[in-house]
Each structure stands twice: as C-alpha cells, then as structure tokens.
Amino acid sequence: MKTPSKQKLRLLYIIDILSKKSDEEHPMSATQIMDYLREDYGIDCERKTVYDCIECLNEYGYEIIKSQSPRGYFMTPYYFEPAELRLLIDAVQSADFISAKKSKSLVKKFSSFASEYQYKRIEKQVYIDNRNKCANENLFILIDIISSAILARKQIEVFYRRRKIVDGKTARYEEKSMTINPYALIWADDHYYLVGNYSKYDNLIHLRIDRLKSVKVLDTYSRHFSEVSPYQTSFDIADYSNKHLSMFSGDIKPVEMICNNTMIEDFVDQFGEKVSMKPYDDENFIAKVDVAVTDGLVAWIMQYGNKIKVKSPKELKNMIIDKTNSILALYNG
C-alpha cells in the first residue's frame, strides 16, 4: 500500500498539536504550530497554510477558537471536559475491581483526551487512599467474554475461586466449575458481579467477576431469565441492583420500616427517588419498599442502630433479633 506523504497528513498533525499543546490558557500562534510541524513531523509550510487548515478543521466539526489575549489558537475539548476526565480518572483509581496495573494503563490512555497542561493539573489533584486493588489481571477479558455470551444468549462455563483455610494453614483457593445462564453484569459495592442462573437450580445467583479463574462460552443457549426472575421482556439491571443490597440473593418482599427523619437522604440514596415515605410522627417517617430480605438488608439496617425499626415482615424482624443476639453472645461469651 502506498504511504501517504507527510503533507497529506498535515491536518491530522495539526489536530494532534492543538489537542496536546493548547488550551484556553495556552493558545498557540500560527508560528508555534509551524515550528511543531517542522520539528516533530518534518513538515514545512507557510502561515497562510496553517490558517487554511484551521478553517478546514472548523468546517469539518472541530472547534478551534481564535484567542485575542493572549493571541493564538486553541482547541476546545473534543471528547471530555477536564471535569469529566477528572471524574473518570478518580473512578478508575478508586475502583477495587480494577488491578493496579490496569488502573495505570487506563489513566495513561485518558491523558490522550486532554492537553498536557490540563492533564498535569488533574494528575496533581487526584488523591486515592492506599486501598487494596484486584489482583486478577484478566478481569477485563472475562467481562468481554461474558458480555458476548449475554448478547448471544449462550451459556457459559465458569471456574469460580474462593479462599479457604486448609489444615489450619494459610488460605488456599478452592475452585468450582459451574454452568451458568448469564443475564447481566452489575457494578455494586465497588465490585463487578455476574447475575445469572446456575443451571442446577431455579433461582438467580451472583458471582464476583474478580473471583473467576476462567470463562468459556458454550454452544448451548441460555435459559430465559423470565423462568427464574420476575422480569419478562428485559432484565432490569437498575431495578434488580436496587432491590438486592450488597448483591445478596433472596426473594423480593414488601418491607415497612420506621425511620428517623435524619435517614431520608440515606433512604433515597439506597432505594431511589420513587421510594414511598410518609410522616409517622414528629421525629420519624415510615417507608415502604420492595426488596430482597437477605443478610445484606439486615447489615444495611443494623449499621444505623436505633434509627431504623422494622415494622414488617416478621421474618426480617426475627433475622435482625437473631443477628443482634448472636453478636451479644459472641462478646458476652
């Protein structure tokens, strides 16, 4: 294939120069652009050629602004605003399910969406505590394989790993092979989960993606989610994650709770804007929500101490009483 001449690539080089070397606070003159073209790409051109190229790029859809003070040109963010980029970098660096190596790789890629000046400013402001990061370097590959299987409606075979203490020694991995009907991938509590049906049973299970050793797409078609969930035409990921706290599996039931008024924002954060809340007395409100009655819900309620009292169902009240008594027995024993 014939290699294009550098002159024909001039427009692309100017985009690269302006995206990396300019922003609103650092506009570039036509002379500076000409210097970079010559020094970095070996292209000589006149000032008028630079003006024509900028006009052409603006016609195409790029937004290259002519600044008066200081004089010069800069390109507005074509993909992300600095604040948007900062948000993405923060999310990647703080996500436990992304390995340290992959986090560094992604942050480096993000740098291509900002000028050098903008990225240096963002980089200095980013702070993440020394949290544990996922050690599974294949996580992104596994997510891609599972996503493909969900779209193709195919079953997958997974090897799931969990640590266990063996003979009183250090923790070792215990592996289990399962045939899964995959329905959704959900990011919850800083982990990625696969929601699906273990082919031996008639319910839904959650598997942490970072605990999967391997995934293989099978030739057999998946069981439809309507057979094992309340969803009929589409699997509602948002609804499902709102009703399964900490991704514990369980039956969805109507729950009533009497909550202190200081709990309103926490309740909306957890269950969404549409949750039913009505005044109960001067200091409390009563909330009604359909949610899975599980240990995850018990843990969420207990973290607020005496600010939440379960009114119904009795099953949930007993779970909280049993959990409280077991904790008391542990410390009193």
Image (tube, rainbow, N blue to C red):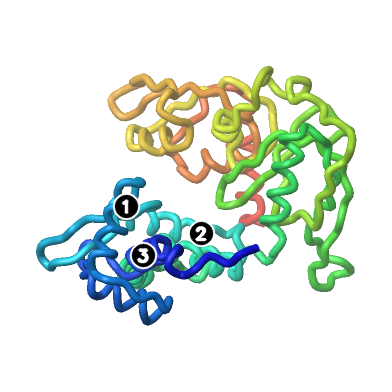
Tag 3: amino acid: Ile
Image height check: is 152 above or below 329? Answer: above
| Residue 205: image tag | none
Q: Position of residue 120 (x, y in %)?
A: 35, 72
Under circle 2, the secondary element is helix
Which residue corresponds to mark 2?
Answer: 92
Q: Position of residue 223 (x, y in %)?
A: 82, 27
Mark 2 neighbour class, 10 Å CA radius: few under 14, some 14 to 19, many 20 or more: some
Q: Is residue 122 visible?
A: no
Q: Is residue 327 visible?
A: yes
Task: Kindly identify the residue that appears in the image at 73 percent across and 41 percent down.
Answer: 148
Which residue corresponds to mark 1?
Answer: 56
Between disc 1 and disc 2, the foreground one is 1
Which quadrant would residue 127 be assigned to in this image?
bottom left
Distance from label 2 to label 3 (Cα)?
Answer: 30 Å
Mark 2 or mark 3: which comes first in sequence?
Answer: 3
157 lies left or right of 322: right
Tag 2: amino acid: Val
Q: Position of residue 90 (x, y in %)?
A: 44, 60
Under circle 1, the secondary element is helix
Task: Kindly identify the residue that appears in the image at 28 percent across and 64 percent down.
Answer: 49
Between disc 1 and disc 3, the foreground one is 1
Residue extending furthest bottom? 39
Mark 1 neighbour class, 10 Å CA radius: few under 14, some 14 to 19, many 20 or more: few
Mark 3 neighbour class, 10 Å CA radius: few under 14, some 14 to 19, many 20 or more: some
Which of 146/264 is in front?
Answer: 146
- Asked if the residues shown at circle 1 and circle 2 are in contact, with their CB atoms under 8 angstroms apart, the answer is no
Under circle 3, the secondary element is helix
